[in-house]
Image (tube, helix red, strand yellow):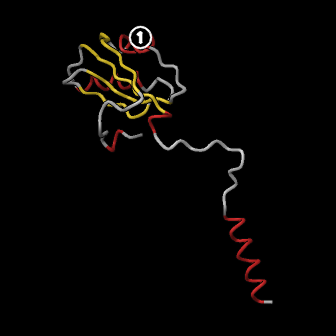
Amino acid sequence: MKAKISGLILVLVVVFSVPDTFGQQPERDTVSKIHKYVKVEVKGMACPFCAYGLEKQLKKINGAKEIYIDIQKGYATFRVSGKNDVTKEKLDKIVIDAGFKPGNITFSNKPFIKSIPEKIRK
């Protein structure tokens, strides 16, 4: 009798500890499939205040994360959700509104930089 009760308890524990995922979409296992990466050439940045002004404008993009600005090389990179419809025209306007001249804009499904500093990963 004890063996049957122990077995029943074990079955109940297993059944109720398994998450109910029936009918749900499986999670995607790679970031590159659910995000797109953007690299914007920015002409005219000269100091950290310039970068900060540009960053404030880029944060206005819905879902923009991991914004990284390289002042010396003159570009900004960031990622957005794959569903975000960020366009070249929208990015041109953002860069101009920040007080700079936009250059080449590149979209990718892979990050442009290998390692983003921890403080930027938000």
Which residue shows up at 46% across the image and 15% down it?
87
The C terminus lies in which quarter of the figure? top left
Q: Is residue 64 left or right of residue 83?
A: left
Vertical arrangement, residue 96 with respect to residue 6, above or below: above
Quadrant of the frame with the N terminus: bottom right
Residue drawn where x is 66% and y is 57% of the image: 19
Q: Residue at x 46, y 23 (%)?
A: 60
Badge 1 crowding class, 10 Å Cα cut-off, few under 14, some 14 to 19, many 20 or more, is some
Query: Measured from the top left, where is residue 108 in percent x and y?
Result: 39, 25
Q: State the image quarter where residue 17 is shown.
A: bottom right
Indicate the amino acid at tag 1: Lys
Q: Residue at x 51, y 26 (%)?
A: 62
**Left or right of residue 21: residue 96:** left
Q: Residue furthest bottom?
A: 1
Q: Image quarter for residue 93?
A: top left
Depth check, front residue: 69 or 8:
8
Q: Which residue is mark 1?
A: 93
Q: Position of residue 12 (x, y in %)?
A: 74, 71
User: Quick one: 61 or 109, which is closer to the camera?
Assistant: 109
In the rendered image, residue 30, in percent from the top left (x then y), is placed at 46, 41
**Label 1's element?**
helix
Q: Residue furthest right?
A: 1
**Based on the displayed image, in which of its 4 quarters is residue 47 positioned?**
top left
Q: Is residue 41 above or below residue 7?
A: above
Q: On the picture, is 103 further left or further right than 6?
A: left
* Of 9 and 48, the residue lying toward us: 9
